[in-house]
Amino acid sequence: MLTFSPRSVSRDLLSGLPERSRKVLIDRFGLTPRGERRTLDSIGKEYNITRERIRQIESHGISSVRDSDAYETHSSAWGDLKKAIQNLGGVVSEETILDEVPKSSADRAHIIFLLTVGHHFSDRREDADFKTRWHVDDTLAEQVERALANLYEAIEPTRLVPEQEILELFSDLLKKHEIKNRQPDVLARWLQISKRVGKNPLGEWGRMESPHVRIKNTRDFAYLTLKRHGSPMHFSEVAKSIKNLFKREAHAATTHNELIKDARFVLVGRGLYALKEWGYQPGIVRDVIASVLEREGPLSRVDIIERVKRERYVKDATIAVNLQASTFVRLPDGRYTVST
């Protein structure tokens, strides 16, 4: 993407600085083979001066680079880097820049240094809503961030949205901020700026605070597994599918224990689990019978068995046995109701 060597330009820009200023900038930006950035405090201790004094040296060093003849000499590099940012969408997260712009990992720290000293580029530091991002157009940056905030509000708290749908929704919101006809790859990069909207390992989008997006434990992986499968699964199959889908070890017994604890799952048969959001009610067979009768009124045994088997994978005889409990009363016409 770049036609120049970031390391060579950085080295040339730093060459005219006093030794201490040059060393401070190298340490602060990690412009070494190992790429390790140092804090103000650690550098201050090395020189036996305060962190505030190191910050002043850093700021003065950046200003000196901008005012140097070397800065003007590399005008084509600034234009090249600006074009690269524009091609990525004009406003882009720092992590995306580091993934897509450098020719090698050794160039990553040098790219950030050049963005920092270049007049063409502005950055916005990470906050509660957005990751660290760089842009070449203040108005565009504001519009994109407002659209991302609107997108968060437009997504229901626990809803998962396919990627094509999230791109279409985001595109519609951008149009309200006078941004039109952007390519899907640009929209995807803008989505990466947000810390409040994200996607899960299956590529489905939603609010980041949702357990369906920010996957933390076996229960969350089990939820995605069942949702993808679309029908009840035995806990051992859930464990196997977690391993196949997410390359994550999940033991059957552990998975079973996790499913029991989580209200998102309903035991619908011997070892079979379904998602509550599919309409399955929690509880034992007797509870399901009671729920059916309370909802629909008195029913015959045949009708009760048919209704219960929509929600539980059990034998007819098991349902019939539960009908004999004192919870239910057999009416003179042969139908059953809940005892009062």
Image: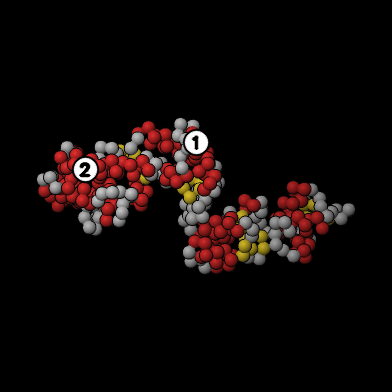
Q: Amino acid type of disc 1?
A: Leu
Q: CA distance from mark 1 to mark 2?
A: 39 Å
Residue density around tag 1, few if under 14, some if 14–19, many if 20 or more, within 10 Å: many
Q: Amino acid type of disc 2?
A: His
Which x, y percent locates residue 63?
18, 38
Residue density around tag 2, few if under 14, some if 14–19, many if 20 or more, within 10 Å: some
The residue that disc 2 covers is 74
**Residue at 38% of width from left, 36% of height from top?**
141
Res. 17 mark? none
Which colour style is shown?
secondary structure
**Viewed as shown, does residue 198 lie left or right of 300?**
left
Q: Nearer the viewer, residue 332 or 34?
A: 34
**Viewed as shown, does residue 20 lie left or right of 197?**
left
**Residue at 27% of width from left, 56% of height from top?**
106
**Residue at 33% of width from left, 37% of height from top?**
136
Mark 1 or 2: in front is 2
Res. 173 mark? 1
Which x, y percent locates residue 147?
46, 36
Which x, y percent locates residue 121?
29, 39
Mark 1: which secondary structure? helix
Q: Nearer the viewer, residue 136 or 290?
A: 136
**For the residues bearing labels 1 and 2, Cβ distance under 8 angstroms:** no
